[in-house]
Amino acid sequence: MKIIPAIDILNGKCVRLLKGDYSKVTEYNNDPLTQVYLFKKAGFKTIHIVDLNAAKTGGSENLEIIKDIANIEDIEIQVGGGIRTIDKAKDLISNNVKRIIVGTAAIKDIKFRNDLKENISVENIIFGLDFNIIKNSPLLSVDGWTNNTNINLFDYIDENPWIKNILATDISVDGTLQGPNLNIYKNLLNYKNINLIASGGIGSIKDIYNLKSISCNECVVGKAIYENKILLGDLLNVN
């Protein structure tokens, strides 16, 4: 299983939010590039980057930092947060970003979704389908997790059968270290032929092996690394 360490950038710094709450911020590193080099030195070749400012505003507050990271030798990055126009998507791809993560605009804007389909390889697009469990249904959230929709996760996948990479995050467990939502992930893996990237709630090496046991291909690990709940060496030894 491919394990991808995460860097969330807010106001130019590495942070983590608790359950996506912008008022509950923990800072871990003042310099995202330094953090990338720490991951690179440990042996990781792919990094997950989220621009939290852009996720909320749709702007480009941390874009230059992201482009600097994308130019680091022997590192591939996947980037999310505020990618709401085809021009921004193309700009990131042209600046060495391997995969873009689209969420809000890909959920709310059919034209943008069609533009992605027509202009960017499906291999280079990750659909960030972040959800809250509301009345026992996984309903998608948008605008940096600040607004819930009435769109069911599985209905969205049904309506867009062409998509391949899905980053599914249960917001209710994100940043809690209490373990990922294995039930939803099992259903997703049995539901469609997708590449599932698990995210949210991973707090121990056991959680990683649980994901591997249900044939999850990739996972993103964030807070557990920064809080020293999982050692980088142990992550690399999973396979």
Image (cartoon, rainbow, N blue to C red):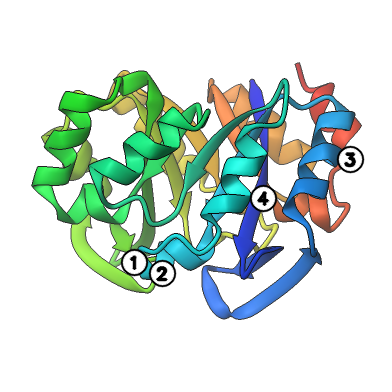
Q: Residue furthest bottom?
A: 23
- Rate crowding at label 4 as few (under 14), some (14 to 19) or many (20 or more) other CA atoms within 10 Å: many
- Rate crowding at label 1 as few (under 14), some (14 to 19) or many (20 or more) other CA atoms within 10 Å: some
Apparent side of residue 238 relative to residue 80 in the rendered image (left or right): right
Residue depicted at x 39% and y 25%: 124
Q: CA distance from mark 3 to mark 2?
A: 31 Å
Decide which of 116, 66 is in the foreground and name it.
66
Assess whether mark 2 and mark 1 are in contact (beta carbons under 8 angstroms).
yes
Look at the picture and state if 173 lies above or below 181: below
Q: CA distance from mark 3 to mark 4?
A: 16 Å
Residue that carries the numbered disc 2 in the rendered image: 56
Residue type indicated by callout 3 = Leu
Residue 42 coordinates in the image, percent (x, y):
88, 30
Quarter occupied by residue 89: top left
> Which numbered disc flags the more N-terminal residue, 4 or 1?
4
Q: CA distance from mark 1 to mark 2?
A: 5 Å
Assess whether mark 4 and mark 3 are in contact (beta carbons under 8 angstroms).
no
**Image quarter of the C terminus:** top right
Residue 143, labelled with which disc?
Answer: 1
> Which numbered disc flags the more N-terminal residue, 1 or 2?
2
Give the mark toward the camera: 3 or 2.
2
Residue that carries the numbered disc 4 in the rendered image: 7
**Image quarter of the N terminus:** top right
Residue 147 coordinates in the image, percent (x, y):
31, 72
Residue that carries the numbered disc 3 in the rendered image: 231
Residue type indicated by callout 1 = Asp
> Which numbered disc flags the more N-terminal residue, 3 or 1?
1
Residue type indicated by callout 4 = Ile
Q: CA distance from mark 3 to mark 1?
A: 32 Å
Residue 202 coordinates in the image, percent (x, y):
67, 48
